Structure formats: C-alpha cells, structure tokens
Amino acid sequence: TLKLKDMDITTVIEYVKKHMMPLAMRNNINFHVEYESNLPKVSIDADRIKQVLINILDNAFKFTPSGNDVVLNTWHEDDYVNIVIRDTGCGIDKDELPKVKEKFFKGKGSKSQHGIGLSICDEIVKLHGGTLEIDSKLNCGTKVTIRLPVA
C-alpha cells in the first residue's frame, strides 16, 4: 500500500542526489541532476519513489564506465512530471530489452543479485498511475523515463 501525499518532487530528487552522489564519486561517474523550477506537486509515496530512483541510478552507475556520465533530468509536460535517467553505459541488447521489467529476468551481462529490481520499480510507478519506459542501445547507454501524474 502507498502512503500518498501531495508534494514537491524536487524534495525527493534532492534527497536522491545527496544519497547517490558519494557512490557516483567513488565510481568516478559524472552525476548531473537538473530540474525545472516551480514543478507542480505530485501525489506520491516519497519513500517508494526514492526506492525507484535509487534502484535505477544504482543500475546506471553499475553499467557506466568510470569517467562517463549519468544524468537525472526532471520537467513538467502536459499533466505529468517526467523524470529521465540517462547513462552512457554498455546498454541493453535489443533482444533482452522487452524482458528487463519481468520478475527474475537477468540479462547476459547482468550484475543483478535477484533480477527483481526493475519489475518492482515498474509496479511502484504503475501504482502511482504513472509509467516507466526503458530505451537502450547496446554500447550506447540506457534511458529510463518515469512519468508521474500531476496532483
């Protein structure tokens, strides 16, 4: 069950930035966080959305070579707040891409313990009335787009 509260998503973004920056620095990843000012409020369970963002960023850091970039960008469009996490890592094979949100799926190059992270992230976002989409190209990086409805 979710504990929904209308809130400013930048509070969550700043928490995640502060929490993940030391890992980025340890891995020599250039971690950039950008967001529009005056974003509309979203009705979210902040702890669950933090869990989603931290999981996706953790994956991005694992698969991005030292010295490369990971960017978290947030903006408002139509009735949604968009959160995009883009990395310059190894990417996901086009044959595996449709399966990455399935429970217990682990790809060939996976560094995953259990293969449940992205399926749980997808479920959490869906419970918020949003969507989670993954676009990737092998050897070119991955882009995860989360769309959350405005409160």
Image (tube, helix red, strand yellow):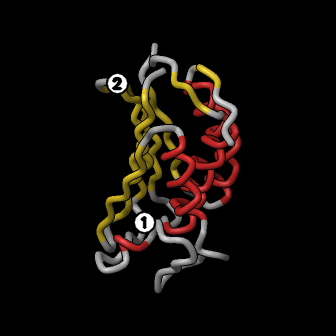
Q: Quadrant of residue 75?
A: top left
Mark 1 is surrounded, within 10 Å at the Cα level, by few (under 14), some (14 to 19) or many (20 or more) other residues, namely many
Left or right of 18 in this view: 7 = left
Q: Residue furthest top?
A: 38
Mark 2 is surrounded, within 10 Å at the Cα level, by few (under 14), some (14 to 19) or many (20 or more) other residues, namely few
- Where 52 sits versus 6, above or below? below
Q: CA distance from mark 2 to mark 1?
A: 31 Å
Q: Secondary structure at mark 2?
A: loop
Left or right of 118 in this view: 150 = left
Q: Residue at x 60, y 56 (%)?
A: 55
Q: Earlier in the sequence, mark 2 or mark 1?
A: 2
Q: Are marks 2 and 1 in contact (CB under 8 Å)?
A: no
Q: Residue furthest front?
A: 1
Badge nearest the viewer, 2 or 1:
2
Q: Nearer the viewer, residue 20 or 51?
A: 51
Mark carried by residue 89: 1
Q: Quadrant of residue 61?
A: bottom right
Q: Residue at x 70, y 39 (%)?
A: 47
Q: What is the three-letter code of the residue carrying label 1?
A: Gly
Q: Residue furthest bottom?
A: 108
Q: What is the three-letter code of the residue carrying label 2?
A: Asp
Q: Residue at x 69, y 33 (%)?
A: 3
Left or right of 56 in this view: 86 = left
Q: Residue at x 53, y 62 (%)?
A: 118
Q: Secondary structure at mark 1?
A: loop
Q: Position of residue 13 (x, y in %)?
A: 58, 33
Mark carried by residue 132: none
Q: Position of residue 74 (x, y in %)?
A: 43, 33
Q: Quadrant of the N terminus?
A: top right
Q: Position of residue 95 (x, y in %)?
A: 31, 80
**Residue indicated by mark 2:** 79
